[in-house]
Structure formats: structure tokens, C-alpha cells
Amino acid sequence: MIDVAAAAGVSKMTASRALRGSKDVSTESKDRVIAAAKKIGYFGNHLAASLSSARSDLVGVIVPSLTNIVFPQVMSGISDGLLGTGFQPAFGVTDYNLYREYELVGRMLSWRPAGMIITGMEQSDQTRKLLIEADIPIVQIMDTDGDAIDYVVGFSHQSAGAEMAEALFGAGRTRFGYIGCNLENDLRAKKRKQGFFDVLKRYDIAITTQLGGILSSVSEGRRLTQELLEQTPDLDCIYFSNDDVAFGGLCYCIEAGIAVPNSVALAGFNGLGLLEGFPGLIATSTTQRHDIGRASAGIITQSLQSPEQLKSRKLVMQPTINLGALQT
Amino acid sequence: MIDVAAAAGVSKMTASRALRGSKDVSTESKDRVIAAAKKIGYFGNHLAASLSSARSDLVGVIVPSLTNIVFPQVMSGISDGLLGTGFQPAFGVTDYNLYREYELVGRMLSWRPAGMIITGMEQSDQTRKLLIEADIPIVQIMDTDGDAIDYVVGFSHQSAGAEMAEALFGAGRTRFGYIGCNLENDLRAKKRKQGFFDVLKRYDIAITTQLGGILSSVSEGRRLTQELLEQTPDLDCIYFSNDDVAFGGLCYCIEAGIAVPNSVALAGFNGLGLLEGFPGLIATSTTQRHDIGRASAGIITQSLQSPEQLKSRKLVMQPTINLGALQT
């Protein structure tokens, strides 16, 4: 570090601050320090430094899955949000398994992370205990239906499902089918389904048929839509657990010559780029994945630097409903 | 640790081995130790342990992007490959920026990782220098066209492009268009294009038209396919930089009533699940993303435990070509 400071012509303190990405250092000094560090090949020993301060520059991030593009997009937001802050994300994947989540949390805490970002509100009691005792900022993301450990950034899936039911009912649909994949494990998809069904019940509409799949994928959505429409051809609307599954349904309808949305409306969830293949044909709730990731990263850094500036422990970014061609 | 061993009724050594996921410990003992550790809330201090051994249990993983599902699938393979080994992946994203890659490598090395997995063969000289000097196993993945630093797991993109050109020519196509997105940064897509063009040149076929996009997405593929076919309606084949872009092209053709593959064949790259929306309509090269991730994780652990068992420094998993409905 002394070598870097000397090569850059700044004090050791300034060099140290510049390399940590502190805002107190001018851009010019920062550039000089980075150039000097680069030249010398210096990257310090963050591990030793973090041990002495009993905290590393890692932010632990736990997601349930990488096979749906949603979580990589959240991770991308976190990665962007931490860029230049001196913190680095370390990701772990639970496969929607609560015991694996517990093990991951335990392992990550042994690195003494600066903070943790964890998906959902349904941690086991033991996991919650670990997180509470860690005494670092914890951000639960993607959901707000449940008890917060510390900070929360997300939205209510129950409300999102309810709002979609209202919107489809408002657009004149009355004969509903439902297709959900991986509902055993994907508790947030289950909450959306619950919200959706609650509204229909209030309007005294019975869901005619529903089917469940194990894998959540385009091909599974395609297969289940065919099965559902063969069972119940007079449906005028299908709600799917997410956009991947709904898009598979659309592909089937197009091939089978079933007019979407005139004959049957399809509704998904997430607002994936995939839907732009056939713009407007699938109604969806567009979630702010990247922004939720970015905001959660911001809360970690803010709560470490100036927690008094954080206005609230809960940041709600409710998805917006887009009915596309169904809107008249 | 002593508490855990006592609670589990095993020696401290056994408890330590069990928690590291060692194979020398019986499943029964392992279960007992894990149950005891869980009960006590013990996860050790890996950071301190790793400092004393000058090595942490982190495996640094660097990918260029999270917005195409390919890299999350590789990461999922790495995560699965490290499960139960005592190592944990920490991911970083470069956004295809070589300087960001250099900074990420530097930062990750400061944690003293047990090994590093990095995408591609095109690191800058400075990044290569850091990796070589780190003296830990380095696995470059997803590509084999270039100079290896240490271990390599992937395939030749140049050959993959060439093989697709041979296959399409073999299926009787002669009037080719090309659509590539993000070629400035995605050097592997550029290599596929090069391989593809080289073969056509050998057969004395000129590519009639080509178009480039910045973002690689379904909607960009859709837009560019419309533009390309309006410019050159008599094409009988389009090669795309990947499946997302090709799928957007298919969506346009279906809506415009252009018969695929009879009138125009579409060829992508990756073998994404997306293609199952319209099975067989897009020719593709199916890559083993998950297996490449898993194998690279295996090489890291193997080279730390028993390097003599590693047969080769280069593992080639060439994609298989699937022509779908184009196959006669």
C-alpha cells in the first residue's frame, strides 16, 4: 500500500480510501491510485484486512434458482449496485431447499460478510436465528408478505395475483383455468395463485380446471396448455405461474390456431423479454427485478455508512400490470 | 469445534472432516456431526482458518453476463459441482469489459481463493499475469480457441460455426444471411461467425446480407430479421449469433406467414429450452453448459486434492448440431 501511495504521489490514507472506492477522494486522485495499483499489481489482502476489522468486503447473496432468468437479473442489479463501493457479491443457490439455505447462510456468515441479501421471507427458524445473531444488515428481497428480519425490498405476491385477477375480470373474462409449475417449492408463485383465487371466489367464479407441473419451463407450459384446453375447451382465460410457462402456452395456441387473446387470454408474471417475441399477446405483471437487486445493494452499503439516512426498513416496488392486446 | 465433536460423540478430527465434507467420514458420523453443529449453531470461522492456511474455501467464478440464461446455467453447474466439497463459489460479472475483468480478478485474488474459474481465453496480459502468479488452479471455460493459462473446459466456437455452415450447406441451403448481436464484445460469437464465413467462402458462397445489433435479445432478433428479409427476401437461410436472437427471428416469420424452415431456415446457437416453444423449427448447436460448469468445479477440487488423477489440462465438450425439421 505504501508503494502504491508513493507511485501515485498521495498519502497512504488517500490511497487506501481510493482503493476502497470511498467518495471522499477526488476522481483525479482515484484514477492515479488505480493506475499506480495496476502498474504495481497491487490488490492488497482484503482477507487479512477484513479479519482485523472482523468484517470482509463480501456481501452474501442467496437466490433459490438460476434456471429462470429472473434471479440472474436480480443478481445483475446487485452486482451493478455494489460496483465501485468496495463490496463484492458472493452468490449461493438453494434450489428452493430450506435446509440448503440454512447451510449456505451458515457458511457465508463464517466469512464475516458485510451484509446479506436473501430471497423471500420464508426462512426456517434456525436460519432466521443465524441471520439475526449475525448483527449485520440483512435484506430480504422479492417478497413483502411475511415477517421481516431487518430490511425488505420487494412486493406482495398475494396482491400481484389478486390485481391480475381483477384486471382479467375487468376485461370481461369469466371462465378461468390455472397452470402452475413448481408450486411445491416456489412459495411466491403459490402466494400469487392464492391472491388470484381469493378474488375469483369473491366474484363467485369457480376455477374450472387447473394443472400443475414440476419443472417451470416453456416446454412444460406448452404441454400443460394443450392438456388443459383439451379438457376444458371453453375457457376464455388461463393464469400461469410465470411468463416462461405462459409463453409455452402461447406457442401451443399459435400452432393450434387458437386466437390469443380473443378466444383465450393468457396471463403470466414477470414481464420477461421473451414476451417481445409476440408483443402484447400475453398479459403480465412486470416486476422490477434489476431495480430490486440494485436497491437491496444500496441498502447494505447505506446501512453500513449512514444508516440514519435510510427512511424505511421496507421498500415496496409493486409490479405493474400490462394487459397488452387484451386492453380495449 | 470441540463442543460439536462432544455433542456428536466423535473426535475433533472427525467432526472437522465431516464439516468439510470429506469422504473419509461415514455418512452416519457425518449426519451426527451436522445435527450437532446445527443444534449448537456452529459454523466455524472459515475466514480465520483460511488465513492460517493462506487459502480460503472460496472458488472465484467470473462470467461476462447474467442477461443470457447461458451463464446462469454454467454457474448452476459450478454450484452443483462444488456442493458438499467444502468449497463455495463467489461470482463476479464483467459485462464483457476486460478492465472490469482485471479488477474483479485482482479483488478475488485478495481473498486467497482456492481456485478460479474464468470465462473465455481472451484475458488481458495483466489479468493473465495476475492469474499465473496466483499459483492456484485456474480453469478457463466455454472456449478452447486460444492459449491456456492452466486448465481449459469448453469447445471451439470457430469449429462450432464451421460445423453449422457445413450442416446447412449439406441440407441444401445456399443463400445465406447473418444476424449477430453484441459482436463487439462477445468474442465467442465472433469466432462462430468467423468459422461459419470461412466454410461458405471455401464453397464460394457469398453471404448476401448481414446485420448487427447491440443488445442480444428476442426482440432485437425479431426486429433485425424483419429488416434483413425486407432487404433480401430471397434468402433461404439465416445464421444468428445465438438462440435468443434466432427465436425472435422465428416469432417474426410465424407472424409474417413465412414458412420455417421450408422457405427460410433459421439457425441459432446453444440449444436453449426456449426453442421448445416451437419444437424443431430452429436448427441449433446444443452446448453442455451445465456439464461444463460441473466439470470445471471438479477440476478445481481434483487439482487441489489429487492433481495426478487429472488426465489432461484440456477438456473438450463440443456441441452437437441439431437440424430439427430441416433434417430430411
Image (tube, coloured by chain):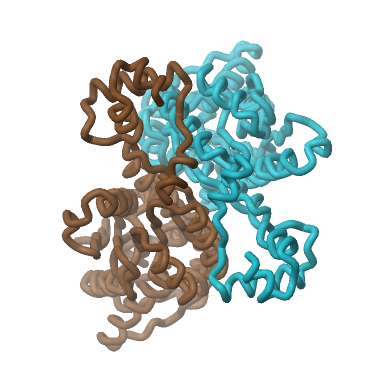
Chain colours: A brown, B cyan
Percent of width and height locating residue A45: 48, 35
Position of residue A118 relative to residue A39, above or below, is below
B52 over A262 or under it: above or below: above
Whether residue B176 is visible: no
Q: Nearer the viewer, residue B254 or A241?
A: A241
* Residue sitting nearer the eye, B25 or A153: B25
B211 lies above or below B104: above
Taking the spot 44% from the left edge, 49% from the top edge, the residue there is A72
Q: Residue at x 43, y 51 (%)?
A: A54
Residue found 57% across the figure and 76% down from its top: B39
Quadrant where the C terminus of chain A is found in the figure: bottom left
Q: Is residue A152 visible?
A: yes
Measured from the top left, where is residue A126 in percent x and y? 49, 74
Q: How many marks?
A: 0
Task: Please identify the quarter of the rendering in which residue B138 is found.
Answer: top right
Q: Quadrant of residue B245?
A: top left
Instruction: Give the quadrant of the N terminus of chain A.
Output: top left
Q: Position of residue B22 (x, y in %)?
A: 74, 57
In this rendered view, identify the residue nearer to me: B112 or A93.
Answer: B112
Residue visible at 33% across and 62% down? A261
x and y percent of residue B214 in the render? 37, 29
Residue B81 horizontal side relative to residue A266, left or right: right
Specify whether B239 is left or right of A163. right
- Comparing B28 with B251, the one in front is B28
